Amino acid sequence: MRFKQMRELLEYVSQCRVAMSKLYDRLDHQADSSRVKLLLEYLRTHQLEVAEKMDEYIEEAPHGVLDTWFKRLDYDDIIQECNGVVLEGGADEHAVMNLALELDNKVLGLLHLALEQSEHMETQSALEAVLAAERIRQQRFVHNTLRMDDI
């Protein structure tokens, strides 16, 4: 995939979160364990909330930042990857958690790549803020799922 403007990148990140939510919903129908189903439901809801936050950020961000162009920002299609994931029979919550972290880290990696390739200070600051918020959400997500082990 190739992104031209910051707006396109952030919209794609939001679309990735929605695709991940749809993935977890689809996997829920394949899951055997009630614990895995509970985790998948949490992941589905979490990704929709993160997508909503990203959409809110896009609405509120300065147009100058959103209209910033990247020279070349190529990345693998995360949405396509979500569409190809299948839950193996007997998969436990750890396998689901590893999948969720892998996909989440790909989104964070995309944002980090954009930060590295950004040439404008205002865009760099915006990307640093988005990355910081995404990392905090990821930490909370990991802590919340670890608390599910206690259930």
Image (cartoon, helix red, strand yellow):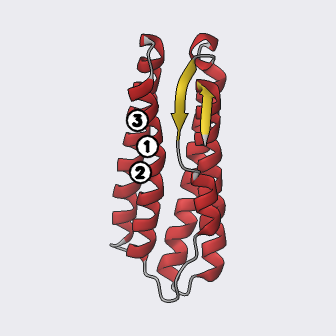
| Residue 49, image x, y percentages | 58, 46
**In the rendered image, which residue does mark 2 sit on?**
105
Secondary structure of the residue carrying numbered label 3:
helix
Question: What residue lies at 48% left-to-right and 46% top-to-bottom?
Answer: 107
Query: Of the numbered discs in the image, which one, if any, rests on residue 108?
Result: 1
Residue 112's disc number: 3
Alpha carbon separation for disc pair 2 and 1: 5 Å
Check disc 1: other Cα within 10 Å, few if <14, some if 14-19, many if 20+.
some
**Residue 76 or residue 144, whichever sits in front:** 76
SS type, badge 2: helix
Give the residue drawn at x 49%, y 69%.
39
Q: Which quarter of the image is occupied by the C terminus?
A: bottom left
Callout 2 amino acid: Asn
Which residue extends farthest front?
72
Amino acid under label 1? Leu
Q: Position of residue 115 (x, y in %)?
A: 42, 27
Q: CA distance from mark 3 to mark 1?
A: 6 Å
Query: In the displayed structure, would residue 102 be above or below residue 26?
Result: above
> Residue at 59% of width from left, 51% of height from top?
77
Which quarter of the picture shows residue 64? top right
| Residue contact between numbered discs 3 and 1, judged by CB atoms under 8 Å | yes
Instruction: Determine whether, in the image, residue 130 is placed left or right of residue 94.
Output: right
Residue 17 at x, y percent in the picture: 59, 49
The numbered dot on residue 61 is none
**Pick the front one: 31 or 75:** 75
| Residue that appears at 62% across and 54% down | 79
> Badge 3 local density, few (<14 within 10 Å), some, or many (20+)?
some
Residue 44 figure quarter: bottom right
